[in-house]
Amino acid sequence: MAPLFLLFSLPFAGHDYGQALSKSILFFETHRSGYLPYTQRVTWRANSGLNDGKASGVDLVGGYYDAGDNVKFGLSMAFTITMMSWSIIEYSKQLAANGELRHAMEAVKWGTKLLHQSSSPTLRPLWRGS
């Protein structure tokens, strides 16, 4: 009988985890809302949500859509940005070795900007809509 560790390692043989890492970070670019930067790697995506908050007199342009729809949730975005930030701190060498450190940092910055906008003192304390 084969050792247990061999049985569990067989299904994972031949997988390219660097490619999986790249695609998982690219996933965030597909969910961007707002004016997209010229560095946007997902070329089929265009600017979107440019009037978010305008009807209520607040600027809520930017951030990430939650699930491929046109909804942005602050809590899930904050959790995601926190986990991505933590991953950058813990695995910056591995991210850099795969050429993904800059993309990961841009992803954090993109989401953080909207969280900062939606919690500014003029919106007291967090904009929740009407």
Image (cartoon, helix red, strand yellow):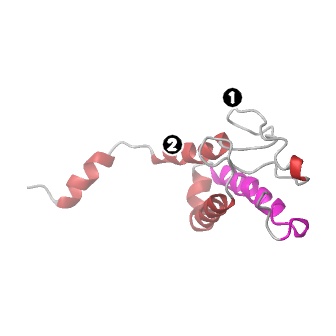
Q: Residue 32, labelled with which disc? A: none
Along the line of sight, the residue nearer the viewer: 5 or 23: 23
Q: Amino acid at mark 2?
A: Gln
Q: Is residue 45 left or right of residue 94?
A: right
Q: Is residue 72 left or right of residue 127?
A: left
- Please report whichever mark, 1 or 2, sits nearer to the chain's N-terminal start: 2
Residue 11 within the segment the image draws in magenta: no
Residues in magenta, as a range: 100-124
Question: Is 69 located above or below residue 124 in the figure?
Answer: above
Q: Residue 44, labelled with which disc? A: 1
Residue 105: give x, y in percent of width and height. 70, 56
* Front of the two marks 1 and 2: 1
Question: Is 104 located above or below residue 92 in the figure?
Answer: above
Residue 100: give x, y in percent of width and height. 62, 50
Q: Quadrant of residue 77?
A: bottom right
Position of the C terminus by quadrant: bottom right
Q: Which residue is situated farthest in the top direction here?
A: 44
Residue 65: give x, y in percent of width and height. 67, 47
Q: Residue 19, labelled with which disc? A: 2
Residue at 89%, 70% in the rendered image:
121
Q: Which residue is situated farthest in the left direction here?
A: 1
Q: Amino acid at mark 1?
A: Trp
C-alpha span from label 1 to label 2: 20 Å
The secondary structure making up most of the magenta span is helix
Residue at 79%, 66% in the rendered image:
126
Question: Are the residues at dot 1 and dot 2 in contact (C-beta closer than 8 Å)?
Answer: no
Position of the N terminus by quadrant: bottom left
Q: Quadrant of residue 16?
A: top left
Q: How many marks?
A: 2
Residue 110 within the segment the image draws in magenta: yes
| SS for dot 1 | loop
Along the line of sight, the residue nearer the viewer: 53 or 63: 53
